[in-house]
Amino acid sequence: DRVEFEADVEDLAVADDHYAAILPLRCIRMKEKEPEKWKLFQTFQSHCQERRSANTDLWAYHEEHGVEFVRDMCEYREELTGDEIHRMIGIMSVNSLEIELDEGYGEEMGFYPAFSNINHSCLANAKPVKLKDKAVQVVTKTRVKEGEEITFQYIVEIQPTRIRRGMLNRKWFFLCSCTRCCDRTECGTFLGALLCQDRDCGGSVLPDQPTVSSSSFSCLECGSTVEDQEAVRIMNEAEINTRKKDPSDHVVNHIEKFLQKYEHILHPFNYVMASMKMKLGCLYGNCPQYPLATMTKTIMMRKLQVCQESLVPLAILDQGNVGENKWKGRLEKEISKVQYLLQNK
Protein backbone atom coordinates (compact mmCIF):
# COMPACT_ATOMS: atom_id res chain seq x y z
CA ASP A 1 0.00 0.00 0.00
CA ARG A 2 2.99 2.29 0.44
CA VAL A 3 3.96 2.54 -3.26
CA GLU A 4 2.64 1.29 -6.57
CA PHE A 5 5.04 -1.18 -8.15
CA GLU A 6 4.58 -4.22 -10.36
CA ALA A 7 7.55 -6.55 -10.77
CA ASP A 8 8.16 -7.89 -14.25
CA VAL A 9 8.99 -11.56 -13.60
CA GLU A 10 9.48 -13.40 -16.87
CA ASP A 11 10.04 -16.96 -15.60
CA LEU A 12 8.36 -18.09 -12.38
CA ALA A 13 10.60 -21.16 -12.23
CA VAL A 14 13.71 -19.00 -11.84
CA ALA A 15 14.66 -17.04 -8.71
CA ASP A 16 14.13 -13.48 -9.95
CA ASP A 17 16.19 -10.59 -8.53
CA HIS A 18 12.98 -8.90 -7.32
CA TYR A 19 12.51 -11.72 -4.80
CA ALA A 20 15.48 -10.39 -2.80
CA ALA A 21 13.29 -7.56 -1.48
CA ILE A 22 10.59 -9.85 -0.06
CA LEU A 23 12.52 -10.82 3.08
CA PRO A 24 13.37 -7.29 4.27
CA LEU A 25 9.84 -6.11 3.44
CA ARG A 26 8.36 -8.87 5.60
CA CYS A 27 10.75 -7.97 8.40
CA ILE A 28 9.71 -4.32 8.12
CA ARG A 29 6.06 -5.34 8.31
CA MET A 30 6.83 -7.29 11.51
CA LYS A 31 8.54 -4.20 12.93
CA GLU A 32 5.50 -2.03 12.14
CA LYS A 33 2.70 -4.46 13.04
CA GLU A 34 4.14 -6.87 15.62
CA PRO A 35 6.53 -4.95 17.92
CA GLU A 36 6.92 -7.77 20.47
CA LYS A 37 8.00 -10.26 17.80
CA TRP A 38 10.28 -7.62 16.32
CA LYS A 39 11.90 -7.03 19.69
CA LEU A 40 12.60 -10.76 20.01
CA PHE A 41 13.87 -10.94 16.41
CA GLN A 42 16.37 -8.17 17.13
CA THR A 43 18.03 -10.18 19.92
CA PHE A 44 19.57 -12.60 17.40
CA GLN A 45 22.98 -12.24 15.78
CA SER A 46 23.30 -11.15 12.15
CA HIS A 47 27.08 -11.53 11.65
CA CYS A 48 26.98 -8.65 9.16
CA GLN A 49 30.70 -7.93 9.28
CA GLU A 50 31.64 -11.58 8.82
CA ARG A 51 29.07 -12.11 6.05
CA ARG A 52 30.33 -9.08 4.16
CA SER A 53 33.95 -10.21 4.36
CA ALA A 54 33.17 -13.84 3.53
CA ASN A 55 31.12 -13.25 0.38
CA THR A 56 31.41 -9.79 -1.14
CA ASP A 57 29.40 -10.78 -4.23
CA LEU A 58 26.43 -11.98 -2.19
CA TRP A 59 26.61 -8.86 0.00
CA ALA A 60 26.60 -6.64 -3.11
CA TYR A 61 23.62 -8.59 -4.51
CA HIS A 62 21.57 -7.97 -1.34
CA GLU A 63 22.73 -4.36 -1.30
CA GLU A 64 21.42 -3.77 -4.83
CA HIS A 65 18.30 -5.92 -4.98
CA GLY A 66 17.26 -5.92 -1.33
CA VAL A 67 18.57 -2.93 0.59
CA GLU A 68 18.54 -0.23 -2.11
CA PHE A 69 15.30 -1.47 -3.64
CA VAL A 70 13.53 -1.20 -0.28
CA ARG A 71 15.01 2.19 0.54
CA ASP A 72 14.48 3.77 -2.89
CA MET A 73 11.63 2.02 -4.68
CA CYS A 74 9.64 1.38 -1.50
CA GLU A 75 10.51 4.80 -0.06
CA TYR A 76 12.06 3.72 3.25
CA ARG A 77 15.23 5.81 2.88
CA GLU A 78 14.20 8.27 5.59
CA GLU A 79 13.14 5.54 8.01
CA LEU A 80 15.75 2.81 7.66
CA THR A 81 19.50 2.80 7.13
CA GLY A 82 21.20 0.30 4.87
CA ASP A 83 22.85 -1.31 7.91
CA GLU A 84 19.46 -1.91 9.53
CA ILE A 85 18.16 -3.71 6.45
CA HIS A 86 21.35 -5.76 6.10
CA ARG A 87 20.89 -6.77 9.73
CA MET A 88 17.38 -8.07 8.98
CA ILE A 89 18.74 -10.16 6.12
CA GLY A 90 21.61 -11.40 8.27
CA ILE A 91 19.43 -12.52 11.17
CA MET A 92 17.32 -14.62 8.82
CA SER A 93 20.35 -15.98 6.96
CA VAL A 94 22.10 -17.16 10.11
CA ASN A 95 19.12 -18.29 12.21
CA SER A 96 16.48 -19.61 9.81
CA LEU A 97 15.55 -23.19 9.03
CA GLU A 98 14.58 -24.60 5.65
CA ILE A 99 10.93 -25.61 5.45
CA GLU A 100 10.20 -28.74 3.46
CA LEU A 101 7.56 -28.09 0.80
CA ASP A 102 5.89 -30.39 -1.67
CA GLU A 103 7.50 -30.68 -5.09
CA GLY A 104 6.81 -27.69 -7.30
CA TYR A 105 6.28 -25.24 -4.43
CA GLY A 106 9.76 -23.71 -4.48
CA GLU A 107 11.81 -22.96 -1.38
CA GLU A 108 10.89 -21.45 1.97
CA MET A 109 12.79 -20.54 5.13
CA GLY A 110 11.27 -20.19 8.57
CA PHE A 111 12.40 -18.35 11.70
CA TYR A 112 11.76 -20.26 14.94
CA PRO A 113 13.05 -18.21 17.91
CA ALA A 114 13.15 -20.97 20.51
CA PHE A 115 14.68 -23.44 18.07
CA SER A 116 17.27 -20.91 16.87
CA ASN A 117 18.66 -20.62 20.40
CA ILE A 118 19.74 -24.28 20.40
CA ASN A 119 23.46 -24.70 19.85
CA HIS A 120 25.23 -27.04 17.47
CA SER A 121 27.18 -30.19 18.24
CA CYS A 122 28.65 -32.63 15.73
CA LEU A 123 27.55 -35.41 18.09
CA ALA A 124 24.16 -33.98 18.98
CA ASN A 125 21.73 -35.40 21.52
CA ALA A 126 18.61 -34.07 19.78
CA LYS A 127 17.18 -33.65 16.32
CA PRO A 128 14.61 -31.30 14.71
CA VAL A 129 11.52 -32.99 13.33
CA LYS A 130 9.64 -30.91 10.76
CA LEU A 131 5.88 -31.33 10.78
CA LYS A 132 3.48 -30.88 7.89
CA ASP A 133 1.93 -27.77 9.45
CA LYS A 134 5.43 -26.18 9.35
CA ALA A 135 5.89 -26.55 13.09
CA VAL A 136 9.21 -27.94 14.33
CA GLN A 137 9.67 -30.34 17.23
CA VAL A 138 13.03 -30.95 18.89
CA VAL A 139 13.22 -34.58 19.98
CA THR A 140 16.09 -36.10 21.97
CA LYS A 141 17.97 -39.00 20.37
CA THR A 142 19.68 -40.14 23.56
CA ARG A 143 19.03 -39.97 27.28
CA VAL A 144 19.77 -36.41 28.41
CA LYS A 145 20.89 -35.80 31.97
CA GLU A 146 19.43 -33.01 34.08
CA GLY A 147 21.36 -29.81 33.38
CA GLU A 148 22.89 -31.18 30.14
CA GLU A 149 22.67 -28.86 27.14
CA ILE A 150 20.32 -29.82 24.31
CA THR A 151 22.14 -29.69 20.97
CA PHE A 152 21.45 -30.60 17.38
CA GLN A 153 23.58 -30.85 14.24
CA TYR A 154 23.39 -27.98 11.78
CA ILE A 155 24.85 -29.89 8.81
CA VAL A 156 25.01 -33.38 7.30
CA GLU A 157 26.80 -35.65 9.75
CA ILE A 158 28.82 -37.79 7.32
CA GLN A 159 31.52 -35.15 6.63
CA PRO A 160 34.87 -35.41 8.48
CA THR A 161 36.06 -32.79 10.96
CA ARG A 162 38.37 -31.06 8.45
CA ILE A 163 35.47 -30.33 6.06
CA ARG A 164 32.70 -30.00 8.63
CA ARG A 165 34.36 -27.25 10.68
CA GLY A 166 34.98 -25.23 7.53
CA MET A 167 31.34 -25.53 6.48
CA LEU A 168 30.15 -24.40 9.91
CA ASN A 169 32.50 -21.44 9.90
CA ARG A 170 31.43 -20.30 6.43
CA LYS A 171 27.71 -20.43 7.24
CA TRP A 172 27.48 -19.70 10.98
CA PHE A 173 30.89 -18.09 11.63
CA PHE A 174 32.20 -20.25 14.45
CA LEU A 175 34.84 -22.97 14.73
CA CYS A 176 33.32 -25.97 16.43
CA SER A 177 35.20 -27.57 19.32
CA CYS A 178 32.67 -30.18 20.38
CA THR A 179 33.56 -33.66 21.64
CA ARG A 180 33.60 -35.14 18.17
CA CYS A 181 35.72 -32.37 16.65
CA CYS A 182 38.34 -32.75 19.38
CA ASP A 183 38.49 -36.55 19.14
CA ARG A 184 41.00 -38.03 16.68
CA THR A 185 38.67 -40.90 15.77
CA GLU A 186 35.58 -38.64 15.61
CA CYS A 187 33.91 -40.74 18.34
CA GLY A 188 34.77 -43.99 16.62
CA THR A 189 33.47 -43.07 13.17
CA PHE A 190 36.93 -42.71 11.56
CA LEU A 191 35.42 -40.56 8.80
CA GLY A 192 38.66 -38.66 8.23
CA ALA A 193 41.03 -41.63 8.58
CA LEU A 194 43.58 -43.12 6.21
CA LEU A 195 45.30 -46.50 6.48
CA CYS A 196 48.97 -46.75 7.38
CA GLN A 197 51.19 -47.51 4.39
CA ASP A 198 54.08 -48.85 6.45
CA ARG A 199 54.78 -52.49 5.74
CA ASP A 200 52.55 -54.97 7.59
CA CYS A 201 50.83 -52.24 9.63
CA GLY A 202 47.58 -50.99 8.05
CA GLY A 203 46.61 -49.11 11.22
CA SER A 204 44.34 -46.07 11.33
CA VAL A 205 46.09 -42.81 10.41
CA LEU A 206 44.43 -39.77 12.00
CA PRO A 207 45.15 -36.07 12.59
CA ASP A 208 47.15 -35.51 15.77
CA GLN A 209 45.26 -32.28 16.53
CA PRO A 210 41.89 -32.45 14.74
CA THR A 211 40.98 -28.79 15.37
CA VAL A 212 44.28 -27.50 13.92
CA SER A 213 44.03 -27.15 10.14
CA SER A 214 47.74 -27.85 9.55
CA SER A 215 47.98 -30.80 11.95
CA SER A 216 50.09 -33.74 10.89
CA PHE A 217 48.60 -37.25 10.83
CA SER A 218 49.96 -40.31 12.61
CA CYS A 219 49.15 -44.01 12.88
CA LEU A 220 47.45 -45.23 16.03
CA GLU A 221 49.34 -48.53 15.81
CA CYS A 222 52.94 -47.77 14.83
CA GLY A 223 53.15 -43.98 15.17
CA SER A 224 54.22 -43.45 11.56
CA THR A 225 53.49 -39.87 10.44
CA VAL A 226 51.99 -38.27 7.32
CA GLU A 227 52.15 -34.55 6.58
CA ASP A 228 48.77 -32.81 6.53
CA GLN A 229 49.17 -31.68 2.89
CA GLU A 230 49.73 -35.27 1.79
CA ALA A 231 46.79 -36.64 3.79
CA VAL A 232 44.46 -33.98 2.41
CA ARG A 233 45.77 -34.57 -1.13
CA ILE A 234 44.97 -38.28 -0.90
CA MET A 235 41.40 -37.62 0.23
CA ASN A 236 40.81 -34.83 -2.29
CA GLU A 237 42.14 -37.02 -5.08
CA ALA A 238 39.84 -39.83 -3.97
CA GLU A 239 36.86 -37.49 -4.14
CA ILE A 240 37.82 -36.49 -7.67
CA ASN A 241 38.19 -40.14 -8.69
CA THR A 242 34.66 -40.94 -7.53
CA ARG A 243 33.49 -38.79 -10.45
CA LYS A 244 35.94 -40.11 -13.06
CA LYS A 245 33.75 -42.82 -14.52
CA ASP A 246 34.53 -44.40 -17.86
CA PRO A 247 31.48 -43.72 -20.08
CA SER A 248 31.41 -47.38 -21.15
CA ASP A 249 31.48 -48.63 -17.55
CA HIS A 250 28.37 -49.33 -15.51
CA VAL A 251 28.22 -47.29 -12.30
CA VAL A 252 28.33 -50.47 -10.18
CA ASN A 253 31.59 -51.55 -11.84
CA HIS A 254 32.98 -48.03 -11.45
CA ILE A 255 32.28 -48.04 -7.70
CA GLU A 256 33.70 -51.54 -7.24
CA LYS A 257 36.91 -50.53 -9.04
CA PHE A 258 37.16 -47.41 -6.89
CA LEU A 259 36.71 -49.36 -3.65
CA GLN A 260 39.29 -51.92 -4.74
CA LYS A 261 41.79 -49.16 -5.56
CA TYR A 262 41.42 -47.41 -2.20
CA GLU A 263 40.75 -50.35 0.16
CA HIS A 264 44.35 -50.26 1.42
CA ILE A 265 44.65 -46.44 1.36
CA LEU A 266 41.48 -45.11 2.99
CA HIS A 267 39.93 -46.40 6.21
CA PRO A 268 36.82 -48.55 5.55
CA PHE A 269 34.69 -45.86 7.25
CA ASN A 270 36.43 -42.88 5.61
CA TYR A 271 33.79 -40.45 4.36
CA VAL A 272 34.65 -41.06 0.68
CA MET A 273 34.56 -44.84 1.11
CA ALA A 274 31.35 -44.68 3.17
CA SER A 275 29.63 -42.56 0.54
CA MET A 276 30.56 -44.94 -2.28
CA LYS A 277 29.54 -47.98 -0.24
CA MET A 278 26.15 -46.43 0.48
CA LYS A 279 25.54 -45.94 -3.22
CA LEU A 280 26.77 -49.41 -4.12
CA GLY A 281 24.66 -51.09 -1.46
CA CYS A 282 21.55 -49.37 -2.76
CA LEU A 283 22.36 -50.08 -6.42
CA TYR A 284 22.71 -53.84 -6.01
CA GLY A 285 19.20 -55.26 -6.41
CA ASN A 286 17.67 -51.95 -7.46
CA CYS A 287 18.94 -51.37 -10.99
CA PRO A 288 18.16 -53.21 -14.26
CA GLN A 289 21.67 -54.65 -14.61
CA TYR A 290 21.57 -56.13 -11.08
CA PRO A 291 17.92 -57.03 -10.33
CA LEU A 292 17.12 -58.46 -6.94
CA ALA A 293 15.49 -61.60 -8.37
CA THR A 294 18.63 -62.79 -10.15
CA MET A 295 21.34 -61.77 -7.67
CA THR A 296 23.73 -64.56 -6.74
CA LYS A 297 24.54 -65.32 -3.12
CA THR A 298 27.99 -63.78 -3.64
CA ILE A 299 26.50 -60.46 -4.78
CA MET A 300 23.97 -60.54 -1.95
CA MET A 301 26.78 -60.99 0.55
CA ARG A 302 28.64 -58.10 -1.07
CA LYS A 303 25.54 -55.91 -0.86
CA LEU A 304 25.14 -56.80 2.82
CA GLN A 305 28.81 -56.06 3.53
CA VAL A 306 28.90 -52.57 2.01
CA CYS A 307 25.54 -51.63 3.53
CA GLN A 308 26.63 -52.70 7.01
CA GLU A 309 30.02 -50.98 6.75
CA SER A 310 28.57 -47.67 5.58
CA LEU A 311 25.91 -47.81 8.29
CA VAL A 312 28.46 -47.98 11.15
CA PRO A 313 29.34 -44.25 11.29
CA LEU A 314 25.71 -43.23 10.70
CA ALA A 315 24.53 -45.41 13.59
CA ILE A 316 27.04 -43.68 15.90
CA LEU A 317 26.17 -40.17 14.77
CA ASP A 318 22.39 -40.53 14.50
CA GLN A 319 21.29 -42.78 17.32
CA GLY A 320 17.68 -43.80 17.78
CA ASN A 321 14.94 -43.50 15.20
CA VAL A 322 14.03 -39.83 15.50
CA GLY A 323 12.80 -38.05 12.41
CA GLU A 324 14.10 -38.92 8.98
CA ASN A 325 17.64 -39.82 7.96
CA LYS A 326 17.61 -40.56 4.24
CA TRP A 327 20.67 -42.77 4.07
CA LYS A 328 20.37 -44.47 7.45
CA GLY A 329 16.76 -45.46 6.81
CA ARG A 330 17.51 -46.64 3.28
CA LEU A 331 20.49 -48.75 4.36
CA GLU A 332 18.53 -50.39 7.18
CA LYS A 333 15.80 -51.37 4.71
CA GLU A 334 18.33 -52.75 2.23
CA ILE A 335 20.04 -54.77 4.99
CA SER A 336 16.72 -56.24 6.15
CA LYS A 337 15.78 -57.09 2.58
CA VAL A 338 18.99 -58.89 1.70
CA GLN A 339 19.14 -60.72 5.06
CA TYR A 340 15.64 -62.07 4.41
CA LEU A 341 16.65 -63.26 0.93
CA LEU A 342 19.82 -64.92 2.23
CA GLN A 343 17.88 -66.76 4.91
CA ASN A 344 15.35 -68.04 2.39
CA LYS A 345 17.65 -68.70 -0.56
Image: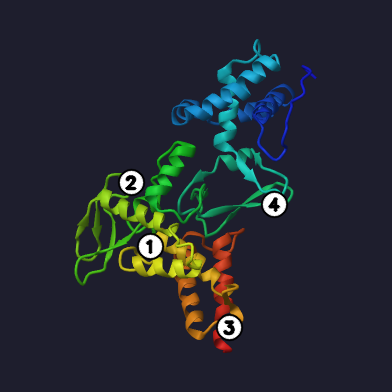
Crowd tier of the residue under label 1, counting other residues whose Cα lies within 10 Å: few below 14, some 14–19, many 20 or above = some
Q: Answer above or below: position of 334 versus 23.
A: below
Q: Residue at the location (40% across, 41% down)?
A: 175
Way the structure is coloured:
rainbow
Q: CA distance from mark 2 to mark 1?
A: 16 Å
Crowd tier of the residue under label 2, counting other residues whose Cα lies within 10 Å: few below 14, some 14–19, many 20 or above = some
The kind of residue tagged 3 is Thr
The image position of residue 230, as x and y in percent, is: 26, 52
Which sits earlier in the primary sequence, circle 2 or circle 4? 4
The image position of residue 333, as x and y in percent, is: 59, 71
The kind of residue tagged 1 is Gly
Q: CA distance from mark 2 to mark 4?
A: 35 Å
Which sits earlier in the primary sequence, circle 2 or circle 1? 1
Q: Nearer the viewer, mark 3 or mark 1?
A: 3
Q: CA distance from mark 2 to mark 3?
A: 48 Å
Which sits earlier in the primary sequence, circle 3 or circle 4? 4
Q: Secondary structure at mark 3?
A: helix
Q: Residue at the location (52% across, 62% down)?
A: 319
Q: CA distance from mark 1 to mark 4?
A: 32 Å
Which sits earlier in the primary sequence, circle 2 or circle 3? 2
From the image, tell me which residue sits under label 1: 188
From the image, tell me which residue sits under label 2: 211
Mark linked to residue 123: none
From the image, tell me which residue sits under label 3: 294
